[in-house]
Image: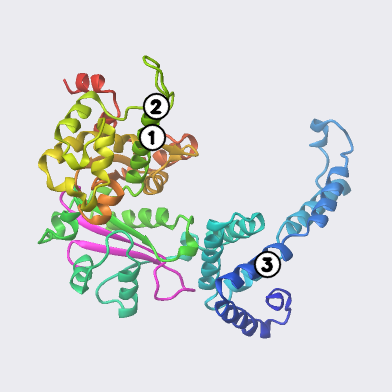
Amino acid sequence: MDLAISLNKTESLDAVLDDFSEGYFSLSNENRKKLLLVLAKEYDLNRNQVRELLKQYLGLELQSGNEGEASNVDDGSVLFSAFYRIEKNLRQALKPTYDVLFERFNNHTGGLKFLSILRADILSFLEHENIVSLRALEYFLKEKLSTWLSPAALELHQITWDDSASLLEKIVAYEAVHPINNLLDLKRRLGIGRRCFGYLHTSIPGEPLIFIEVALLKNVARTIQEVLWDDPSIPEPEATCALFYSISSTQPGLAGINLGKFLIKRVITLVKRDMPQVSTFATLSPIPGYMQWLLSKLASQSVLAKGDNMEQPAGGSGSTFQENLLEPDEERKLMNSAPETCAGKNGMEVMLNLLTSTNYEWTSSAELLSALKPPLMRLCARYLLQEKKGGKALDSVANFHLQNGSMVERLSWMADRSEKGLRQSGGIMVNYMYRVEHIEEYAQSYFSTGHIHASSDVRLYTMPQKEHEATAD
């Protein structure tokens, strides 16, 4: 590793980089972590040099203490030459030594792939232990990768059935949203009425960094069944909607680098050019964090209720942390329809028991589906529009599409009945709409204020019951 950083003979550099990457792959996870810690600590920036340069910079005094007069000093003066020289040296000193290693690998055959694997390892280690020096190394490498993977460096490629077997195998292996079951399934996703686009980079040939699957439809689909299994596809000239139903990244080491933003915009431009009749661009997206959030809420409320029952004197008020997640009508309906196996003291307890029951038995009962639909849809709208982390949407997929300039258009009940869909979101899916004329505006308002644009239908779910009924009337 030291040789890969310090070597000046360029003719020997490729062999050294190959030796280093091969040696790294031969290490156990524990030894990889030790090596990365050495890289992060011993090849960091020279802080003594930075401190000395800062002293020099702060020690420089303008010829006049008046800032207004100082701005009139000739740019060619000795004083300004000193400022520019120290600023140049500071910029160089603030680069850690490991920057040399990253730059050399970026210019080395297969180097970008290696750096992606290196960052994936760092992220994995940081999940278990937050080490400051390793966090700084990860952040620096992320910034470098973001620069190297700008849209200008990426090739948009339409993936078809005629592509190489190895590329198609990677599509099957990396599909992360709706698994591809067999070759017929793959052929359908690449056939008439369907499109698949991926971003390729010359340093990682034959392997898309990210790919998106598109269905050409007459209307925005409500369920994933319509997209994956309904036959036949409509004739393409009749399509007016391009539906993005799956976006998958293939490189764990590129996590947090928003290649999808550029990909969606490029695909919209390409589809509009090739199919002018297509005017609607939307997604049919999972809500991966909804059930985890809701079950946690229900469980905590159940614990608080039990604690209050034990500790509160008669007539006393409940905990300030207690919250009834259900409207009165929802409470009554759940209590009346609950089977004995899922009975509870209140509606929230019944709801928790139903949603955590084995094999999702509630999905087979029309009565239970009817009782669960209103609260699950209403709370899902709340989760997407109001539950935030750091001022942005709590749900990862929601945050991705909102920061790309979309709006929350529609929620669909029982849109994904797969085990994964029921486990993640109770079968609910969401349509995000990309209104071409508003993409930049929506992205900017979300970035600057966290404002989430949503249709009136979705916002209606979050209104108090009385306002909701008045609006409906």
Most foreground residue, 410 or 418: 418
Instruction: Specify the quadrant that holds the C terminus.
Output: top left
Q: CA distance from mark 1 to mark 2?
A: 11 Å
- Select label 3 or label 2 by which is in front: 2
SS class of the residue under badge 1?
helix
Position of residue 367 relative to residue 148, above or below, is above
Res 142 → quadrant: bottom right
CB within 8 Å, label 1 to label 3: no
| Magenta-colored stretch includes residue 316 | no
Residue designated by label 1: 303
SS class of the residue under badge 3?
helix
What residue is shown at x 37% (from left), y 16% (from top)?
314
Res 412 → quadrant: top left
Q: Which mark is residue 310?
A: 2
x then y, percent, for residue 470: 21, 18
CB within 8 Å, label 3 to label 2: no
Residue designated by label 3: 39
Which sits earlier in the primary sequence, circle 1 or circle 3? Answer: 3
Residue situated furthest top in the rendering = 315
Q: How many marks?
A: 3
What residue is shown at x 16% (from left), y 59% (from top)?
236
x then y, percent, for residue 72: 80, 37
